[in-house]
Every structure is written in structure tokens, then in C-alpha cells.
Amino acid sequence: MERWINSLMDTLGAPGAGIAIALENLFPPLPSEVILPLAGFASATGRMNLIAALLWTTAGSVVGALALYGVGALLGRDRTVSLAARLPLVKVSDIERTEAWFGRHGTKAVFFGRMVPIFRSLISVPAGVERMRLPVFLALTTLGSAIWNTVFVLAGYLLGDNWEDVTRYVSMYSKAVLVVAVGAVLVFVAVRLFRPGSGARRN
């Protein structure tokens, strides 16, 4: 994967880094923790301009997030509720609580979510489902993405040949987030299975 990203950047320069980040939003297995510091390293070696790398990777983040926002908007609230309500152990009241939470904290979730692995892509979908105002979504996504991207592009730029150190640390962060997410799901399932009466659905 590193060779493919390198090849893309060698061929297209900073726009190649932007394309890679846009794809990373749509296909999370493409790791931003490799793309961003590698773009910084490429800037340090003169293969691309540092400012261009920052601008293009942020543009790529926004384009990828906007595509997922569109998926959520096309799916819509009614269809989302209908699909989610068919899931085992999920109640309509769960969806309503999630909607209420997003209504109160959606702006913070979109902004800070851009800096959390896994959620940085997924957060765009509920924003689309809830039809968050597009200018607000774009502003929050651009700002959050710019902060995340700048930190890791600059880290790769400053570390030079040791840019892979960034990847190792971010990978640990990503694994910690994944463990917490899986733990939360397991707790939810355990509560629904073992709390008396918790399995009943509300129509």
C-alpha cells in the first residue's frame, strides 16, 4: 500500500495525496496515518510543496466526507430508522435517543470526530441523515480535517526519514479507539441480553 501511495504522489504530486485521502474517507482500510506523514516526507524531500500538500489533503478529506454526507442524505431518516429497527436488540427508542443526542451535539461531533480514527469517516453519514446544514458541515469538516492533516503532514515533514514513527504512534491510537468501540458494543449487547425486559421493542 505504501508503494501505491508513493506511486500516486510521484505521478500526481500533491493532488495525488489529496486523492489518496479522499479514498481513505470512503475506504477506511486505506490508512491516513500512512498517507499524511508520507506526504510530509515527500514535501521534505522536495517531491511536492508543503503548503500544497496541506491544502490538497484537506480538500481530499472534505470531498470524501461530502460523499458520505450525500449517502446519509439519500438514505434519509425514515429509511435509516426502518433499517436500524430491524437489527437485533435495537429499539426505535435507541434511534430516537441517538437523534436527540446528535441534535444537541452534532456540531461538536462532526468537528472532533474528524480527529478520531474510524469515526472520522463515519460521522459524515449521520450528519447527512439529519440533514445538518451543508455550510455548517463543510466548515466544521474543513477545520477539523485541516487540524488533523496539518499535525501529521508536519510530523512527517519534520521527522524526514523517520516519518514511519508517526505511523506507529497513530496506529496505537487507532487500536485504542477500536478497543473502546468494541467494548461499548459488547456492553450494549450484554445489557440488552441480561437486563430484564430490555429486549422488548417499542413500536
Image: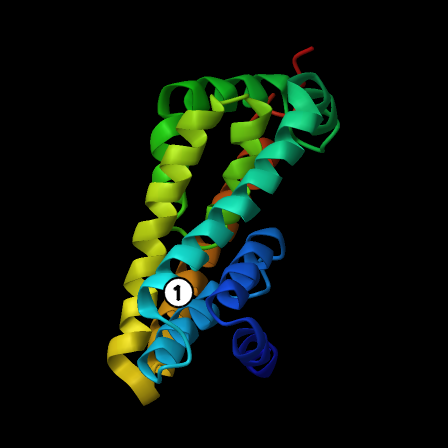
Between 43 and 95, the one nearer to me in the picture: 43
**Residue 31 x, y percent position in the rendering:** 51, 66
User: In which image quadrant can residue 81 be found?
Assistant: top right
Between 104 and 136, the one nearer to me in the picture: 136
Residue at left 55%, top 55%?
22
Residue at left 52%, top 74%?
9
Between 85 and 27, the one nearer to me in the picture: 27
Colouring: rainbow
Q: Horizontally, is 4 left or right of 87 in the view?
A: left
Residue at left 63%, top 22%?
91
Q: Quick one: quadrant of the C terminus?
A: top right
Whether 77 is drawn above or below 153: the answer is above
User: In which image quadrant can residue 33 be found?
Assistant: bottom left
**Residue 178 x, y percent position in the rendering:** 48, 57
Which residue matches tag 1?
53
Q: Residues within 10 Å of mark 1 (few under 14, many from 20)?
A: many
Whether 43 is drawn above or below 53: the answer is below
Residue at the farthest bottom position: 161
- Does any portion of residue 142 appear in the rendered image? yes
Residue at the farthest left position: 158
**Residue 61 x, y percent position in the rendering:** 48, 51
Whether 41 is drawn above or below 105: the answer is below
Q: Horizontally, is 145 left or right of 66 in the view?
A: left
Q: Secondary structure at mark 1?
A: helix
Residue at the farthest top position: 203
Q: Quick one: quadrant of the N terminus?
A: bottom right
Q: Tag count in the figure?
A: 1
- Does any portion of residue 168 appear in the rendered image? no
**Amino acid type, mark 1:** Ala
**Residue 115 x, y percent position in the rendering:** 37, 50
